[in-house]
Image (cartoon, rainbow, N blue to C red):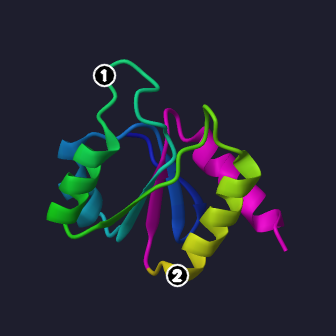
Amino acid sequence: MHIREITPTYHVTGQIKPDDLPAIAAAGYTTIICMRPDGEGWGQPKFELVSEAAAASGLSAHYLPVGGSSVPMEQAAKLKALLKQTQGPILAFCASGARSAGLYQMAQQIG
């Protein structure tokens, strides 16, 4: 897993697996955000499994898929609202981390 810092409290990475969650919690993250729609790629775990593993590791988990039929600006507004109500370091993920970084930048442009 290659984690990239966008800000001190918002980091991005590629796809995570349920067994990654204990290490993510141990690294100090408090929240994960999944921006990858279920079923997008072969071998991708469903968000429900990731969410259950997150809860077992003491992390909050949010599903904010970008792709398919979602509208990026609507998801950016949801991300902006989520960032306002979330404390602690956040790890957002998608296939590579690029969507998670891009949506963050879009969220910052919303007034």
In this figure, which residue is indicated by the disc labeled 1?
A: 43
Q: Which residues are magenta?
A: 88-111
| Disc on the earlier residue, 2 or 1 | 1
Q: Residue 68 occupies which quadrant of the picture? A: top right
Q: Position of residue 4 (x, y in %)?
A: 53, 50
- Above or below, 84 against 93 in this view is below
Q: Residue 80 occupies which quadrant of the picture? A: bottom right
In this figure, which residue is indicated by the disc labeled 2?
A: 85
Decide whether residue 103 is among the magenta residues: yes
Amino acid type, label 1 = Gly
Furthest residue in direction left, as rendered: 56
Furthest residue in direction front, as rendered: 69
Q: Is residue 96 visible?
A: yes
In the picture, measured across the screen, residue 16 lies left or right of residue 33, that is left
Decide whether residue 32 is among the magenta residues: no
Tell me, yes or no, whether the two marked residues, 2 and 1, touch with CB atoms within 8 Å.
Answer: no
Q: Is residue 105 visible?
A: no
Q: Position of residue 2 (x, y in %)?
A: 43, 41
Q: In percent of the image, x 71 and y 56: which residue is there? A: 74
Q: In percent of the image, x 30 and y 22: which residue is there? A: 43
Please tell me whether mark 2 sits on a helix, a strand or a loop. helix
In the picture, measured across the screen, residue 53 lies left or right of residue 30, that is left
- Classify the position of the C terminus by image quarter: bottom right
- Above or below, 67 against 4 in this view is above
Please tell me whether mark 1 sits on a helix, a strand or a loop. loop
Give the Cα distance between marks 2 and 1. 32 Å
Which residue is nearer to you in this view: 75 or 97? 75
Q: In percent of the image, x 71 and y 45: which residue is there? A: 71
